[in-house]
Amino acid sequence: MYDCYRPQRAVNDFVAWAKKLDDQRMKAEFYSGVDKSNLFRDGYIAEQSGHSRGSTMDLTLVRLPARPTRPYVRGQRLVDCTAPQAKRFADNSIDMGTGFDCFNTLAWPLDSRVGGQQLRNRVLLLNGLVQQGFAPYPYEWWHFTYKPERFGNTYFDFPVARSSLRR
């Protein structure tokens, strides 16, 4: 799982970042083919999110046993999320054709440019979640909302505490 519940305050921070058009630090990896000024219009960022209602999650598939992943190191070179999987940031997921949080039409669940095993992987994820009552988001292969939403008009803002557990 990449992302589940997200307090509204976190969504507000994300929205504030998206409105700072001069902050282009993450463009190379997450939205290289999109003008930042269009992130709201294109449906990649919203003022309110199903994540804040507790009904939405971002996830992928991982082969078991899961391989360990290396942590992100601040300042490391960013790689376009549409690059081949071997060149993108390694997150131990199976190849879905783009990285997670890739603001690009190539990340749309059934984009016609995605084929072969990448498409089969997306369809496997999509079908499995739809069978369990989740609806896919048309712009992100990793984003699903449980239907019917129990709190469809509520945006929660309780903070999430970091765990003190050590591995």
Image: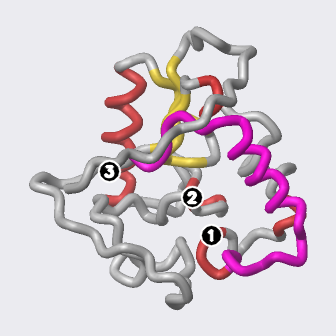
Residue 88: quarter of image: bottom left
Residue 30: quarter of image: bottom right
Mark 1 lies on a secondary structure that is helix
**Amino acid type shown at disc 3:** Asn
| Magenta residue span | 1-27
Query: Are the residues tagged 1 and 2 within 8 Å (C-beta)?
Result: yes
Is the residue marked by circle 2 packed among few (<14), some (14-19), or many (20+) residues within 10 Å?
some
Residue beneath the point at 76% across and 52% down: 13
Q: Residue furthest front?
A: 164
Quadrant showing the N terminus:
top left
Determine the CA span between mark 2 and mark 3.
Answer: 17 Å
Mark 2 lies on a secondary structure that is loop
Residue underneath mark 3: 121
Residue underneath mark 1: 30
Sequence-wise, which precedes: disc 2 or disc 3?
Answer: 2
Is 77 placed above or below 51 here?
below
Between 77 and 103, which is closer to the camera in this rendering? 77
Instruction: Identify the coloring.
Output: secondary structure
Residue 122 point in image, percent of width and height: 39, 48
Residue 28 is one of the magenta-drawn residues: no
Q: Which mark is residue 148?
A: none
Residue 80 point in image, percent of width and height: 56, 79
Determine the CA span between mark 1 and mark 2.
Answer: 6 Å
Between 72 and 106, which is closer to the camera in this rendering? 72
Is the residue marked by circle 1 packed among few (<14), some (14-19), or many (20+) residues within 10 Å?
many
Residue 59 point in image, percent of width and height: 41, 44
Is the residue marked by circle 3 packed among few (<14), some (14-19), or many (20+) residues within 10 Å?
some
Q: Which mark is residue 101?
A: 2
Sequence-wise, which precedes: disc 1 or disc 2?
Answer: 1
Query: Are the residues tagged 3 and 1 within 8 Å (C-beta)?
Result: no
